[in-house]
Amino acid sequence: MQEKEIISKLHELKQIKPSTNWVVSLKKQLIGEQPKISVFDVLSGMIFQRKLAYATISLVIMVVGVFGFAQYTVPGDLLFPMKKITEQSQSALLSLSDQSNYNLDIVNKRLGELAIIIKENKTNNIAPAVQEVKDGIAQAVKDISNSTNDFTNIATRVQKIQQTKREVETLGVIMLQESNNLNDALASLVENEIKVLSQLSDSETLTLEQEIRLVEVKAHYKKGEYMAALEKILLINGQ
């Protein structure tokens, strides 16, 4: 084929235009067919998102309500574990010394709940409540051993525990071993306080009444009656 003929054929090819259907088909293959979004689709999405938001809010309200109701439960109730979760969460936000005081308050609280259970004759709740008290006292014993420098806060809380425990004992529940463990945990606490009071006695800072009570404190200490000694020390300190 002559050179002029080739050039003429090329010009003819340039004038050929592809069909519209072929162009559309090729475009779909290259970039994919874009779905059409209708007003209905937009409204449906908005309604779904709103329903999801309402469902989330309702769930939060329900959970908060359940945890709130759980605060009125006692050991052995279905929702009592949620109450403990709340208490543990609150304790975790406190310093170590404040945690010790908080845990002692919880022991007194468990004893109070045990008293309520017995008075209301909730027989199925008695065993779980007693176990909660035992677990609480075990933790309190550890806390006291690690917090011998915080006498006043510990002593006042232990005194409240002792008072509530006496109420429980009048209802027929005696926890002798736990009482002994709590009593023994006070030994170092009382010993440190006796040293402080003895120094005040030597410097003639104590009144005659306080001196007499200090003698009683020392007598209780020698007998291993640390709970009784603690109560007398609180009287000396004017608590």
Image (spheres, rainbow, N blue to C red):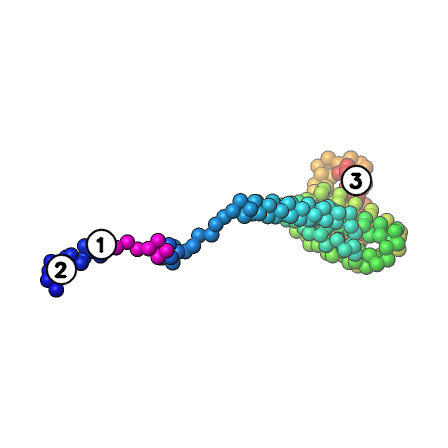
Q: Residues within 10 Å of mark 3 (few under 14, many from 20)?
A: few
- Please tell me in which quadrant of the rendered image residue 43 appears: top right
Given residues 64 and 59, the one toward you in this image is 59
Helix, strand, or loop for circle 2? helix
- Please tell me in which quadrant of the rendered image residue 124 appears: bottom right
Given residues 114 and 22, the one toward you in this image is 22
20 is within the stretch colored magenta: yes
On screen, residue 8 versus residue 162, left or right, reads: left
The image's mark for residue 14 is 1
| Dot placed on the residue nearer the N-terminal end, 1 or 2 | 2
Which is more foreground, mark 2 or mark 3? Answer: 2
**Type of the residue with mark 3:** Leu
For the N terminus, the quadrant is bottom left
Q: Residues within 10 Å of mark 2 (few under 14, many from 20)?
A: few
Residue 238, image x, y percentages: 77, 37
Q: Residues within 10 Å of mark 1 (few under 14, many from 20)?
A: few
Alpha-carbon span between mark 1 and mark 3:
113 Å
For the C terminus, the quadrant is top right
Alpha-carbon span between mark 1 and mark 2:
15 Å
Residue at the disc numbered 3:
235
Residue 33, image x, y percentages: 43, 54
Residue at the spot x=76%, y=55% of the render?
Answer: 78
Which is more foreground, mark 1 or mark 3? Answer: 1
Residue at the disc numbered 2:
5
Which region is colored magenta?
Answer: 15-23
Residue at the spot x=15%, y=56% of the render?
Answer: 8
